[in-house]
Amino acid sequence: MAYRRLLLPLTGTAAGEAALATALNVARIWNAHVHCLHVRVDARDVAPLAGEGLSGAMIEEMMAATERESGERAGRVKDLFQRFADHAGGVTLAMSAETALKTEGPTLSFEAIAGREEDVVAQQSRLYDMAVVPHPEAGEDISSSDALHAVLFDSGRPVLIAPREVPATMGTRVCIAWNGSAESAAAVAAALPWLHRAQAVRVLYADEYQRRGPGVDGILSYLRWHEIEAEKVLFKPITKEVGAGLLGAARDFGADLLTMGAYSHSRLRQLILGGVTRHVLENADIPVLMCR
C-alpha cells in the first residue's frame, strides 16, 4: 500500500508554501505525484450576490473587477509554485498524467481553474489518495477553511493538515487518537501505509474522549492483524481540554504524525462548543491525518 496521488489546494500564503513543501516531502517518501490546484473565483458567482437595485452596468463592472483580481491572484500563486519547483531538487514537473506515470520519483503539476473552491476541491479530491491542506493562518477561524472542510465532509478521502513549519521528519513516530468512533476507524485505515512504515506507533485514549464503540484493546488487536505493533497510553485532558491533552501526549511521544477522526459530533456543535477536532486543527505543530 502506498500513496500515489496527492492533491494540494494551493493559495499564495506563507501557510500555502509550507503545505507545498510538506506535500513534496510526502511525495518523496512514496514516489508520489502532487497536483497543485488553485481555484479562481468565478466572476459569474458575483452577480447573484450583488442584490437588487444595481444596474446591469454596475454588475458587469463588479464582475470585471472580480475577474481581474482573481486573475492577478492566480498569477501570484503560479509564480509561487514555479519558484518553489525551480528550487526543489530531485522533483520532475509533469505536464500531464501520462508524463507523471512514466517518471520515477516525485512529480509536481499545477492547474488553475475557475469555480467555487469548496465544490471543486471536494470533487477533485475523490480522485486522489489524500489531500494536503495548509494550516489555518494565525488568528484565522478554522471554520473559514473551505478547502479543509470540503475534503473532510464531501470527498470521502483523508486529509493531511500541514503544520505551519515544514517538519524535519514525517511518519517515523505515529500517534493514533482512538475513541471508538467510525471516524477514528476510517483514520486508522487511511493511515495504514504510514503505520507499516513507522518505527514506533502509540495509541492514545482517554475516558473523556471515548465514544460509543470498541475500546483501545480492540484497535490494538486490529493493528496486529496488519502486523503493526503498537502500545496504548492513557492521556488526560489539560485544564479540561481533551484536545490539549491529546496534543501534549503526542509531543511526549515525539510524534511526527498524528492520525485521528474528525468531528465525531456535528461540525456545528464542535464550532460552538470547541471540541477536540477544532483544538487540534488550530494548535497542532505536527502533520495531522484526519478522516470524517
Image (tube, rainbow, N blue to C red):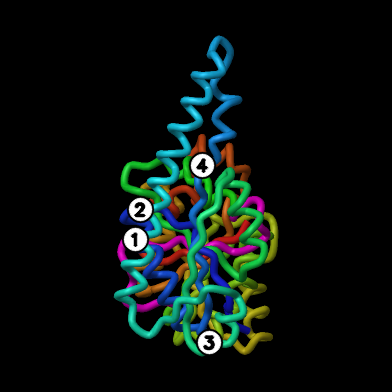
Alpha carbons under labels 4 and 1: distance apart: 18 Å
| Magenta stretch: includes residue 166 | yes
* Nearer-N-terminus badge (2/4): 4
Neighbor class of circle 1 (other Cα within 10 Å; few <14, some 14-19, many 20+) is some
Neighbor class of circle 2 (other Cα within 10 Å; few <14, some 14-19, many 20+) is some
The residue pinned by badge 1 equals: 80
Q: Nearer the viewer, residue 174 or 57?
A: 57
Q: Amino acid at mark 2?
A: Arg
Alpha carbons under labels 2 and 4: distance apart: 14 Å
Identify the residue at horizontal 43%, vertical 32% (top origin): 65
Identify the residue at horizontal 33%, vertical 82% (top origin): 89
Quadrant for the C terminus, please.
bottom right
Q: Are marks 1 and 2 in contact (CB under 8 Å)?
A: yes
Q: Nearer the viewer, residue 29 or 113?
A: 113
The residue pinned by badge 3 equals: 103
Alpha carbons under labels 3 and 2: distance apart: 28 Å
Q: Are marks 3 and 2 in contact (CB under 8 Å)?
A: no
Alpha carbons under labels 3 and 4: distance apart: 33 Å
Q: Which residues are magenta?
A: 151-170
Q: Amino acid at mark 4?
A: Val
Q: Is residue 71 visible?
A: yes
Q: Amino acid at mark 3?
A: Thr
Describe the element under mark 4 as helix, strand or loop: loop
- Residue 252: give x, y in percent of width and height: 34, 70
Q: Are marks 3 and 4 in contact (CB under 8 Å)?
A: no
The residue pinned by badge 4 equals: 41
